[in-house]
Image: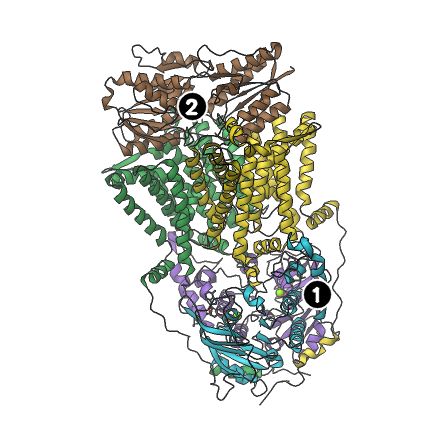
Chain colours: A yellow, B green, C brown, D purple, E cyan
Amino acid sequence: MSDTTQPTRKGQEFEQTLDASDKTVASFEHESRGFVDRLQHALHSNPTLVPVIVLIGAVAVFGLIAGGKFFSAFNLSLIIQQVSIIGILAAAQSLIVLTAGIDLSVAAIMVLMAVIAGNLSVYMGVPPVLGLLASFVGGTAAGLMNGLLVTRVKLPPFITTLGTWSIFYALNLWLSGAQSIRSQDIDANASILKFFGNNIALGGARITYGSILMVAVFAVLWYMLNKTAWGRHVYAIGDDKDSAELAGIRTDRTLLSVYALSGFVCAIAAWASIGRVGSISPQAFYEGNLQSITAVVIGGISLFGGRGSIMGALFGALIVGVFQSGLRLAGVDVLWQVFAIGWLIIFAVAIDQWIRKVSA
Amino acid sequence: MSDTTQPTRKGQEFEQTLDASDKTVASFEHESRGFVDRLQHALHSNPTLVPVIVLIGAVAVFGLIAGGKFFSAFNLSLIIQQVSIIGILAAAQSLIVLTAGIDLSVAAIMVLMAVIAGNLSVYMGVPPVLGLLASFVGGTAAGLMNGLLVTRVKLPPFITTLGTWSIFYALNLWLSGAQSIRSQDIDANASILKFFGNNIALGGARITYGSILMVAVFAVLWYMLNKTAWGRHVYAIGDDKDSAELAGIRTDRTLLSVYALSGFVCAIAAWASIGRVGSISPQAFYEGNLQSITAVVIGGISLFGGRGSIMGALFGALIVGVFQSGLRLAGVDVLWQVFAIGWLIIFAVAIDQWIRKVSA
Amino acid sequence: ADTTACLITKTDTNPFFVKMKEGASAAAAENGIDLNTFAGKIDGDVETQIAAVESCIAAGAKGILITPSDSRALAPVVGQARDAGLLVIALDTPFEPAETADATFATDNFLAGELIGQWAAATMGDTSEAKIALLDLNPSQISVDYLRDNGFLQGFGVDIKDPTKMGDEDDARIVGNDVTNGNEEGGRTAMENLLQKDSGVNVVYTINEPAAAGAYEALKSVGLEDQALIVSVDGGCPGVQNVADGVIGATSMQFPLLMASKGIEAIKAYAETGEKPQNTDGLDFVNTGVELVTDAPVEGIPSITSEEALGKCWG
Amino acid sequence: MTQPVIKARGLVKRYGKVTALDHCDFDLMPGEIVAVIGDNGAGKSSLIKAISGAVSIDAGTIELEGKPISFSSPLEAQDAGIATVYQTLALSPALSIVDNMFMGREIRKEGIAGSVFRALDHAKMREIAREKLSELGLMTIQNIDQPVETLSGGQRQGVAVARAAAFGSKVIILDEPTAALGVKESRRVLELILDVRSRGIPIILISHNMPHVFEVADKIHIHRLGKRLCVIDPKEYSMSDAVAFMTGAKLPEGAVEAA
Amino acid sequence: MTQPVIKARGLVKRYGKVTALDHCDFDLMPGEIVAVIGDNGAGKSSLIKAISGAVSIDAGTIELEGKPISFSSPLEAQDAGIATVYQTLALSPALSIVDNMFMGREIRKEGIAGSVFRALDHAKMREIAREKLSELGLMTIQNIDQPVETLSGGQRQGVAVARAAAFGSKVIILDEPTAALGVKESRRVLELILDVRSRGIPIILISHNMPHVFEVADKIHIHRLGKRLCVIDPKEYSMSDAVAFMTGAKLPEGAVEAA
Ligand SMILES: Nc1ncnc2c1ncn2[C@@H]1O[C@H](COP(=O)(O)OP(=O)(O)OP(=O)(O)O)[C@@H](O)[C@H]1O
Ligand SMILES: Nc1ncnc2c1ncn2[C@@H]1O[C@H](COP(=O)(O)OP(=O)(O)OP(=O)(O)O)[C@@H](O)[C@H]1O
Ligand SMILES: O[C@H]1[C@H](O)[C@H](O)OC[C@H]1O
Ligand SMILES: [Mg+2]
Ligand SMILES: [Mg+2]
């Protein structure tokens, strides 16, 4: 009753000729290409170069315009110092963006944690180390809360963090009574909170511990993302969550860890911010959420997830810092600084887009 | 040489039995379901009901808590009046969100256009109608600029509008010199700018023309989105842009029209805002961008595009207004109002998510 | 010019600071000083102000004029600047403590509030039926905000409890506090909200004149504009005009241009002689003065008319 | 010799370093079904995308009924009468069957409502859609207003084909219409294809299924390495020959080089 | 009678109002290839998703080598030895071939670098990946670090199958592995399947391609309306019979009801 070719198992008749089929790989002649084309291709294979080049370009241009004032070791180290808080926040933001999310609450978490550490250590007599510990636990919990809403309740990250931003902001104002904690009071009761404000003088440069911390945070996260399985999973989730799930990754658990880690990094930023600002201001960094996103996108990390290097965010933050410092020293109004940053965002991402357009 | 069944064209042998194949449609017995289940299904087939129910529920609850003050015709009409500007912005925002975009610049466009209309009509002696016309042209152009960056330069809408937000904000400060234009000066030179501040007393209620305008804007946009081909195209683009393109829609052109229209609606909001505020303040509505997004998501429009009714945004704006008014009248601090709105966002979208989970 | 000075304001979005900048620029040009100006993006934008101070140090400025966005948070960086040999002068908003800066040129904000409070009380006569709406700046409890608010209440004859807190009073005549963000839109909404609580509001204190203009619109829209006295602080030209137009009953005028020009002169003096300015006797700051502006003067409270004020406004 | 409906010469399409079409020719005669076969990545989809305006070509010419055309969008091709059912179907999942069928060529109401207020004539579109679907024997779909995402794969194919067939098209192009379908559903689609052809509309069919191709095609265009290798008559060659040609196992000789 | 590798009884899976599995049974014996055939929407993919932990079932039991299992995620199923190649392949396009092959079971360096610092052993993974790919005759892939998105459809299938076959799996499940592939590429995948089976690993194959099914399957599970209709031996039934059964044209009699 069989109409098949069972015994031989050689497939249908028309498939028999396949053994003779052509095995060579197709190749086509290539047109010779111009410089721009070749540059585009070169950058395509190494996209993190883009923010690096923009950064170097920006430093060079402002060096010319604003002159020695800009180009001094002191000013350059100052820029690093100035971007360090937004830089660390951008690291936290990058983690979320790599998973195709976005976090509007990073700065709110940071400020809230600074207030918690400060209130406990300065006003409530808790040993400063425990105050800091509380802020780390709190930051992680805040991140976890975002993560739970994203993974369990399945809310889009944008909406989740739009909501929690308000929540964290209100808690911050409530806990702090909207009052800053004064530098002198911190010095007297909990000087360790200001640890990252210390600096090392190197020639004209002043490298604060906070600047070093920022670089260290990026280095550690870079390692985690690129050299561990967890990091591969984070990229896979950002790339295509469903595929990652089917490939056997516990995507929800990984996402939770990403959000928790991001909250933890915000708590690190909180500690660093006390050193940087010198006091604890509940009103500071109100725009920090969007500034961290700005750094991330200028750094070439795709808002669609899964593409880009976290180092890009560091360069992104530095680019913004260089622009602001350069424009400030060139005597440009804040007004026009804001204007320039707007165009910077658009140009940086447009260049990135142009480079990614090429097929490898 | 042929091994086919050419002449008969009846397909392979094993396909011959198909004529006899079962033609009935599969059906399965259904478990009886509880009330919650049935509610979930009912709402699923009519998702715009959700914000309506939340709105009615919120009105009822606050009516009980805050009593007659809340529930007066006056207060209810006041709420509508207070949300009218954010409501119109939410209409503009909805257009963008339906195409799977997001617009961080709507409020910035609005304020800039109010400043332009005011500067021209009040200070520069241009006839007020022309001043208004300029603001409409300007709003449309600003929207078009966003649209061009999204369609031609292929920047993600989030990034585009993050950039143009800064740009429009800077222009606003520059043009206005940060100075408000006084109500009395407007009255003297260009009272038409305040047209939408007029109101109709209806019993205790005071319906401003601005409130009516808001409803009219939603009605017109609802009509356009649901009753015209353009509207179907907008939904199709938000649903799946590539498919829409292949189906023969000029997606880029449609997107451009959406952004331009959105900018135009922002200019309408600008006119309405002058009536509402009385004067022209370059500093007002700084948070308007995020507030409009809040209204849209509470209204159940998906940030992934293509799903949700623009009417949802109207209800979303009203829900926020009812919450704020109710909490205020119940004597709750601004601080805790901010806190409550955060949770409101999360709950509203969580409910929406829960309802969409069911297969129809 | 080889002397450089910096002016750092809270924002660029407030006409008060825009005026201040104009005043400083003019004075700098006159005195042959190079002036760099900076501003935060929004009120409370501490980090931008810190960066600005640092840039001034980097730029080798002789002195800094600053309106601190946070009267406590900026102390450390100001300390750095002073250590680096810069003269730091707070304008408009004092530091806490005031000695954080070398000098403070400011309005006595408490007094500014007190004047309008006294004026309102005297204008009403019998204040037992008063229903007071307080339209403050924002939830952040910054010093100008609570000083003016409490000053007003004290002048009006209300027990203010903690003079550094708003909203802790329990006087039954107070209808409530709401925030305005210091602009017209916020003023209008806040006024509507408080009218909702009690439509009998007859005294309205506002943090500044844009908020007052908004409050007036709200009252006018329900036909209650004649029921309430609106008082405010600032003395900006549009505000003074609003006094003339009967929108605002009285306002306390400040002198930002004076603050700025005195500041520049102080830096010049410091650069030339190393001398630092002295505080006004009995105060921990240099009082640049405040004048009550009203077209309905009352006995015992010195004031100027709106017409006189228009000649001086923010001059 | 009658004029070809579609005649393409020397088409070139590059994606960065990849050359998807390498001076490719193509012909479609009136009333015939031309099947296009070839390895994965040979450039079949690129060829039909070039013809249907979905991608712009780097070189070459295309003629529709003797007139040179150059479409910058699928819409223009559609308006010219080239209807395409893409591999991805190009349906909007959240929209209804009617909305999808009329996507891009909606019918407006008569009178002012339509000309000024641009109101859609939902009733008419519904009526026509129902008619078209039943003409093609697709009346298993009960509710014409249900979202496409609630349909099975076979039903979606049906809607896509009905859309292509419905609007007085001159040519219908189908890219692997049966790839995801079961035996029964595949058969329905093949019948649909024959049905459409019987109404005189020529068809281009891309498929990896040799029995299907040999069953319905009048001519087989064999695509290899971005160009037309040859065109064969399925009555004269065996499936083995076709597969040998397309995989490079054999070289065609004396095949119908151009129709 | 030997113990089945997989034995499922009374599986039920509902999606809202749709019942995808309706008290379905399934058996897989050691070393055999079971093909699952059925109409579109019959519930084939749902069945294998239930077995591979990708969806949670509403009722029923599944045993792996006699032990009851209940997976709450694909990872658990993988760890238990059930490897699945989904219709959608489940690859991460932006990641490299190696990254994809080792996704979810990466190898760490030895010593502290691995245990404390959790460093990946890229060199080792690369080596193993290359080995596995060449074992399966997939050495046409030159650069094992290239992103998967640069591969052709056939190559991607290869990577997905290699991933499934590489890690000491007890069962490999393939959901329509040849649907999008050309003749040549389909053949490669069928050879891969036979190759894997020859190493003693049993396979579940879902396919709509009858000749392919009858060529490689040892048993054919016919799925209809969410349940197993019957299991037939391809040597005893013709393709016509199978198609008749699965479409409801004929009722099976005396077919192998359970293996
Ligand atoms: N949008 C694109 N970007 C880059 N390369 C592309 C794009 N589309 C197609 N290609 C490449 O062009 C070549 C031809 O692709 P095409 O889709 O035309 O092949 P095909 O014959 O339809 O293959 P299949 O049978 O798999 O559908 C392939 O190498 C493919 O990778
Ligand atoms: N995630 C889901 N949500 C809702 N319904 C679903 C979902 N997945 C499958 N279904 C429904 O369950 C039924 C069985 O689907 P399944 O994918 O298992 O069929 P199949 O036999 O694999 O079909 P095909 O041959 O087309 O792949 C179908 O009616 C389908 O629409
Ligand atoms: O004194 C000023 C005050 O500090 C503030 O922030 O608003 C403007 C002025 O009233
Ligand atoms: Mg193709
Ligand atoms: Mg399936």
Q: For label 2, count other residues whose C-alpha is less than 10 Å away and answer few (under 14), some (14-19) or many (20+).
A: many
Q: Is residue B137 visible?
A: no
A5 vs D161, left or right, is right
For mark 2, give the secondary structure.
helix
Q: Amino acid at mark 2?
A: Val
The answer to whether the residue bearing label 2 lies less than 8 angstroms from the nearest atom of ligand 3 is yes
Location of residue B281 with respect to C238 vertically, above or below: below
In front of the other: B146 or A229: A229
- Give the numbered dot on residue D227: 1
* Image quarter of residue E111: bottom right
List the residue tagged with mark 2: C144
Quadrant for the N terminus of chain C, please.
top right
Q: For label 1, count other residues whose C-alpha is less than 10 Å away and answer few (under 14), some (14-19) or many (20+).
A: many
Number of numbered discs: 2
Confirm whether circles 1 and 2 share one chain: no
In front of the other: E111 or E91: E111
- Residue D90 spot, x, y in % from top left: 53, 61
